[in-house]
Amino acid sequence: MSGHSLSAILLLLGALIAGCNASNGDRTQFFHNCRQNCERTNCSADGLEIQEQAVKFYRQSVFDRLFQWSCADECQYGCMWRTVFAFFERGWPIPQFYGKWPFLRLMGMQEPASVLFSALNFAVHVRMLRKFRREVRPDSPCYMLAHIFGVTNLNGWIWSATFHTRDYPLTELLDYAFAYSIILCSLYVLVMRMLHRHSLFLRGVITLAFISYYINYFAYLSVGKFNYSFNMMVNIATGSVGALGWFVWCHLVRNRRPYFRRILRFYVLFAMAMCLELLDFPPILWTLDAHALWHLATVPLVPLYYEFMIEDCRTLRKEKAVAGGYSFYN
């Protein structure tokens, strides 16, 4: 170990004794000095020359360059691992950096497991939406609700994959905002399903109310410092109202709509899977953390929701056909 590295680690120890939280790696003097020295040594040129230095010095792959990993980013990444190893050698808990665990970058992606599982969710929604379109006639009640739900989810998972690939303020905002759009859309689907026999005017007014509320909430998230705790509370509250609404509906129709068990099973399993978000542990093999496992857990749940919508739309169409006195096809 060089004298410079030893001095830096001693500074790290001094900072910890002084009361620095050991879980906050980016606040340690060791990380701060490492990053400063790296940027001063390797990122002192201008423009294209800096990027050329980064490509050569850090052996950047084509994916690193594609996702715009700059020289300063490489210094932060390299010093993050030096800090982790310093902690590890002393038996200290693995630190977090800027609120995140250290992840091993793969093909230019910051959190490759979360990116992969977000893509899997996207693929399952595409497959199930296609199945819905094959098995449900376009004139069925609530036919468009399934498409609204599907498109909202597809958009949300695109931005989830984008954010976990590269964490920028903009990608973070879009990930959180569109993740909430999925939860809000689930509540919207519930309300519209309950009101599908009511007038188009009433449904239109409620739709505009949902859209206006979401636009205002999106604007709130976009202004000032992002409030993570408040956003989490809003997500939980909205999701809880939606789940409670479906539970009430399941209870009311349990004797005449046996397929209610599919939506009930979906929300029960979804609540169980969400418990993963309450866990917090260092990534397994530096790639698989609780958040990635949460994304993975939602993949097999998606078909339950679409299977419910398929059966519900078919049933509603049969009931409409009987009431209207015209023939129908399964």
Image (cartoon, rainbow, N blue to C red):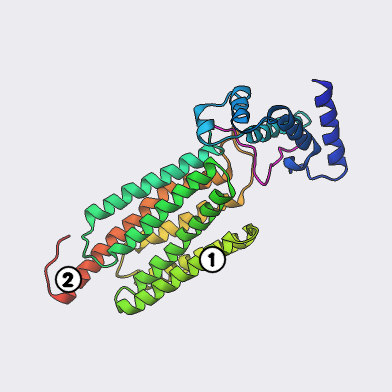
> Horizontal placement of 268 versus 307: left or right?
right
The image shows residue 186, relative to residue 269, as above or below, that is below
Give the residues in magenta: 92-106
3D distance between C-alphas at marks 1 and 2: 40 Å
Q: Residue at x 14, y 65 (%)?
A: 328
Q: Nearer the viewer, mark 1 or mark 2?
A: 1
Percent from the top left, x then y, of residue 288?
Answer: 56, 38
Residue, x 25% and y 54% (percent of image)?
133
Q: Amino acid at mark 1?
A: Tyr
Residue 55 visible (yes or no): yes
Residue visible at 85% across and 28% down? Answer: 7
Quadrant where the N terminus lies?
top right
Q: Earlier in the sequence, mark 1 or mark 2?
A: 1
Quadrant in the picture for residue 281: top right
Asked if residue 197 lies in the magenta stretch, the reply is: no
Residue 97 in magenta? yes
Left/right of residue 326 with respect to residue 87 in the rendered view? left
Q: Measured from the top left, where is residue 214 in percent x and y?
A: 48, 66
| Circle 1 residue | 217
Q: Identify the mark at residue 2; answer none if there is no mark.
A: none
Q: Quadrant of residue 319?
A: bottom left
Q: Secondary structure at mark 1?
A: helix
Q: Amino acid at mark 2?
A: Ala
Using the image, tell me which numbered label, if any, was put on residue 321. Answer: 2
Depth order, front residue of 52/221: 52
**In the structure shown, which secondary structural element does the residue marked by tag 2 occupy?**
helix
On the image, the x and y values in percent for residue 308 come to: 33, 59
Q: Is residue 96 above or below residue 2?
A: below
**Which x, y percent locates residue 72?**
66, 35
In the drawing, does residue 299 fall left or right of residue 76?
A: left
